[in-house]
Structures are given as C-alpha cells and as structure tokens.
C-alpha cells in the first residue's frame, strides 16, 4: 500500500515544480497575474520600433537602474541625422521652414515653403551650400542693387552723395552773349525712416551745390529739408505734421524784366498740422498751416543792389476737406481753403498794398490700385482779393495732381500738374497764374542699368498786363549700378524760355557725368 501512496506524491511534487517555473517565466515575459487590477499594462515589452540606441525590457518589479540597455547606433542612420540637422540650421539662417523639423526659423511646419533664390545669399552669413540641399533656382523679387540703408534702433538711414562734373553753354542764362563754363556739382542727401508698427516719422534732407571755378558769381546753392510725422491716436483717427524749409538760388528775378544780374537767395519755411479720419466710409480732415517767404537782394545791371524785402510775407491758411471711400482704390473728396497773405512792408516798390485774401475750391480723388496705379487727382478754382483797390482781383486754376503708373515691373510713368496764383511786384500786374505740366518715364534696360526721361512745361501768365513766360525742359539720364553702394550717372538737360519780354528769353544745354555713393 505504501507503494501506491508514493505514486500520487511524486505526481504532486512534479506539479508544484512546473507551477513555480511557469510563474517565473510569466513574470519575466510581462504576464504578471498577481499584480493589483489595472497594473497589468504597466510593463513595457521590447519593441523593434524603439528609438535607435535604446533596447531592453522593463518590469515594475525590476531595478530602475536596469531599466534600459544601450547598444551601438547604426552608422548610416546617425550620418543621416547629422545631415538633416545641418540642413535645418542653414535653413533657419535663411528664414526657410524645415519640412522635417517643425517650427525651425520661426515658421510653423504647416506653412508651405516658398522658393528661395540662392543668388541673393550672403556667403558670410550662410556659408557653403551643399549641391544636394539647394532648391531649384527661381527669379528673385529682391532688387540686388537697391540700397539697404543703416538701421539703428527704430530708424533706418539712407545717406547718399553724388559728385558730378558739369558743362553748360549758357552759364548766366542770358538772352545774348552766351558764355559756356565748366563746373562741379555736389548733391548730398539723407533720408530717415522710422520702423515702428504704429506712428511714423520721416526726415528728408537734400541739397545741390554748383561751383564754377571760372565764374564764382554764378555759383548756386539749393537746400530742401522736410520732416513728417504721423500719430496714430486711434485706428480711425490720426494726426499728421509736416515741417519744411527750402533754400533756392535762382538767376535774375523775372519780375524786373532784365534789370538785375547774378542770383538771389530765397527762403521758404512752413508747417502744417492735419487732423483726419481713416479706415471709414466718411473721411473728413482739417488742416491748419503757416508759410513764411523771404527774398534775397540782387545786383543791378548798372551797378548797386536791389532790395527785395518788400516781397517778404507770411501766409496762414486753413483747409476743410470732405472725402468718401467708394472703395479702397478710389476715394473722392471736395476741399475748401482760405489763406491770407500779409507782407512785412505795407507798400511795395510801386507804392501798392499787396496784402490779399485767397479762396480755393477744389475737387479730387485719391487713387490706389496697388502697384499698378497710385496717386492723386486735384484741380479747382481760386480767387485772390487784394487790399489795394488799384489791383484787380485775380482768379484762375489751382490744384496739385500726381500719378504713378507701372505697366510692367521694369517701367514706371509719372504725370503731374500744378496750378497756383503767385506773388509779383511787376508794375500793373496783380498776380501770376502759374501752371506746370510734367511727365517722366523710368525704364530698367538691365537689372543694373536704368534709363530716365522727362518733359515739363511751365506757363507764367502775369494777370493785369500782357506778359506770358513759357519754360520748356527736357531731361535724359542713365544710371549704371556697379553694386548696392556705387552708381555711375549721366544726364543731359535742355532748358528754353520764351517770353513776350525779349530780355527774359534764353536757351541752355547742360551735360553732367559723375558717380553716386549710397548706403
């Protein structure tokens, strides 16, 4: 009987041994049955898709120090990752989004990559480009010859200097006894622009100095300083400010019918403050301003000096303008302006009081058709009423229009028309009706070669007497850019004045050639 009891005991012992071995195998393979409910999925099994260089099994019962077992990375995969990272670094410097690494260069991966012209890269910034990584060449929209300026904080400065030699066949602009001369022309200028998203400040300074070593009496100096500011009070309300100073040195004053010689220095100062609405259908604006004019003395033909201070005057003005936005491209308006001219001296050289009141009524439209057509159409009727009863009231065309048309990216046409009622001291004349029409074209023959042409006609009608001066000007020029900072320039200019007063007529041809430096 004892033999029969030993057989069940052996069977029971074998079963217990198999049970222990199975429990140990299940624990190592991740099937842990004795864990609390919900923790059976906390075990990570070996996965062939795990990151390169990481391998192993993990159990909540294992030692954390044994969590991962490293292995040697695949050399081909590592080299591919290094090439991908170098390409991403280069693209980040160029501002190009990387298709493999989201967010590189500050551009989300969802944004489609734009074409990039490797011809505009700066080797000092981007380094060498691998042939396998560079995209297909495309046409660049960036002008490689446009000056970039000097940026300092919130402002960008654009300095420029032109040095040219000049030849003229009538240095004194005389009707007879023409005399040719050689000279030097210096044209320094500076343009400053603010870079802020709100408000705006701009300054433009330009001057021209013509020097004739053989005839210093004909030296000429011109200077123009214009400052502008825009204050964005609200999205629909802004305040504009403009200040200006103009120095001009012209030949003998036409008002004197040839009695003077040489040149005179004339000064103009002005300031305007405009309150206007924008980004709305109804566009009203109110402008208040003041201008100051001062005229220099001139040498007389027979000797002595003529005092022109009787022409000095101050002109405050106010303008109300009502506009309506038909669309973003067309905004018509009507404008009414009142101005008063007050002279420093009560009587001029002819014993007349030339203080006057002016009333202008104009209609126009602001145009903005993108890059194709922009500008302003402005025309109206003006009246000046003089304080002296001996001077008849003057009336005529007033306004200022300018259009810029770009039929192609390489060609630009400009058109302009201005009209005003100017001052005069000519005996018997109450005012001068000035009308100027001009047109110009700029065409890029090559990316670094630009041709320019312009024509202008000016009519000066002396109201009250029979006198009409007509001025014609033709201008042709070429500019060859060596790079962003150096440009060779040449220009031919033809001037002609026809007048009912023979002593005011003259013809002049000018040729200039030089170099222009820009930053």
Image (cartoon, grey):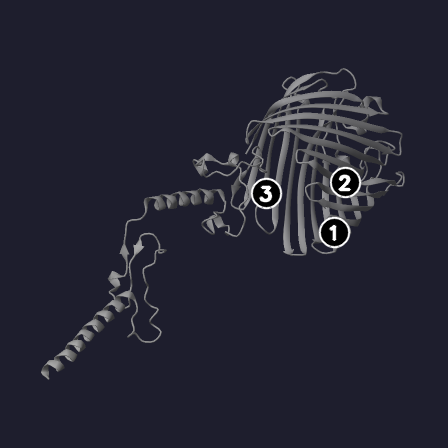
Per the model, the C-alpha gap separating discs 1 and 3 is 29 Å
- On the image, which quarter does residue 18 sit in? bottom left
**Residue at 89% from the left image edge and 31% from the top image edge:** 465
The quarter in which the C terminus is drawn is top right
Specify the quadrant of the image occupied by residue 21: bottom left
**Residue extending farthest left:** 2
Question: Quick one: label 3, few (<14), some, or many (20+) residues within 10 Å?
Answer: some
Q: Which residue bears the numbered disc 1?
A: 327
Residue 340 or 274: which is nearer the viewer?
274
Image position of 427 with respect to 228: above or below = above
Identify the disc placed on residue 401: 2
Question: Percent x, y for residue 157?
Answer: 56, 39
Q: Quadrant of residue 281?
A: bottom right
Vertical arrangement, residue 202 with respect to residue 438, above or below: below
Q: Nearer the viewer, residue 111 or 186?
A: 111
| 435 over 338 or under it: above or below | above
Residue 371 showing in the rendered view: yes
Give the residue at x 79% y 34%.
436
Query: Tag on residue 193?
Result: 3
Q: Is label 2 in a helix, a strand or a loop? A: strand
Task: Return the disc, 2 or 3, that comes first in the chain's sequence.
Answer: 3
Q: Secondary structure at mark 3?
A: strand
């Amino acid at each position: 009987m004892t033999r029969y009891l030993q057989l069940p005991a052996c069977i029971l012992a074998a079963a217990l041994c198999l049970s222990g071995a199975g429990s140990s195998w299940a624990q190592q393979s991740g099937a842990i049955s004795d864990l609390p409910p919900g923790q059976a999925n906390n075990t990570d099994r070996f996965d062939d898709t795990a990151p390169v260089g990481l391998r192993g099994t993990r159990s909540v019962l294992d030692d954390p120090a044994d969590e991962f077992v490293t292995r040697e990375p695949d050399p081909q995969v590592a080299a591919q990752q290094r090439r991908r990272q170098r390409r991403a670094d280069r693209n980040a410097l160029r501002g190009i989004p990387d298709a493999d690494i989201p967010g590189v260069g500050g551009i989300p991966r969802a944004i489609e990559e734009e074409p990039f012209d490797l011809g505009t890269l700066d080797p000092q910034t981007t380094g060498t480009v691998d042939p396998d990584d560079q995209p297909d060449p495309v046409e660049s929209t960036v002008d490689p010859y446009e000056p970039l300026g000097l940026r300092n904080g919130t402002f960008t400065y654009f300095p420029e200097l032109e040095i040219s030699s000049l030849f003229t066949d009538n240095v004194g602009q005389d009707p007879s006894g023409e005399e040719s001369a050689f000279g030097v022309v210096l044209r320094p200028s500076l343009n400053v622009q603010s870079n802020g998203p709100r408000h705006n400040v701009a300054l433009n300074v330009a001057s021209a100095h013509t020097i004739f070593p053989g005839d210093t009496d004909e030296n000429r100096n011109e200077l123009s300083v214009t400052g502008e500011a825009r204050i964005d009070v609200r999205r629909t309300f802004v305040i504009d400010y403009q200040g200006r100073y103009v120095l001009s040195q012209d030949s003998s004053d036409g008002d004197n019918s040839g009695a003077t010689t040489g040149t005179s220095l004339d000064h103009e100062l002005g300031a305007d403050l405009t309150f206007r609405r924008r980004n709305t259908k109804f566009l009203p604006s109110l402008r208040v301003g003041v201008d100051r004019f001062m005229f220099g003395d001139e040498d007389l033909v027979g000797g002595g000096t003529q005092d022109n201070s009787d022409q000095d005057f101050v002109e405050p003005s106010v303008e109300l303008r009502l506009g309506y936005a038909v669309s973003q491209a067309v905004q018509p308006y009507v404008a009414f302006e009142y101005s008063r001219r007050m002279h420093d001296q009560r009587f001029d050289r002819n014993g007349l009081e030339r203080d006057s009141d002016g009333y202008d009524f104009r209609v126009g439209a602001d145009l903005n058709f993108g890059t194709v057509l922009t500008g302003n159409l402005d025309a109206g009727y003006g009246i000046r009423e003089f304080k002296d009863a001996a001077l008849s009231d003057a009336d005529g065309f007033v306004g200022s229009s300018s259009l810029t048309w770009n039929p192609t990216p390489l060609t630009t046409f400009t058109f302009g028309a201005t009209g005003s009622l100017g001052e005069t001291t000519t005996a018997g004349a109450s005012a001068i009706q000035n009308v100027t029409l001009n047109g110009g074209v700029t065409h890029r023959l090559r990316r670094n070669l630009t041709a320019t042409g312009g024509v202008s006609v000016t009519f000066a009608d002396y109201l009250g007497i029979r006198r009409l001066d007509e001025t014609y000007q033709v201008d042709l020029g070429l500019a060859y850019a060596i790079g962003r900072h150096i440009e060779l320039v040449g220009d031919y200019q033809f001037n002609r004045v026809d007048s009912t007063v023979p002593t005011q007529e003259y013809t002049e041809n000018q040729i200039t050639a030089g170099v222009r430096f820009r930053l």
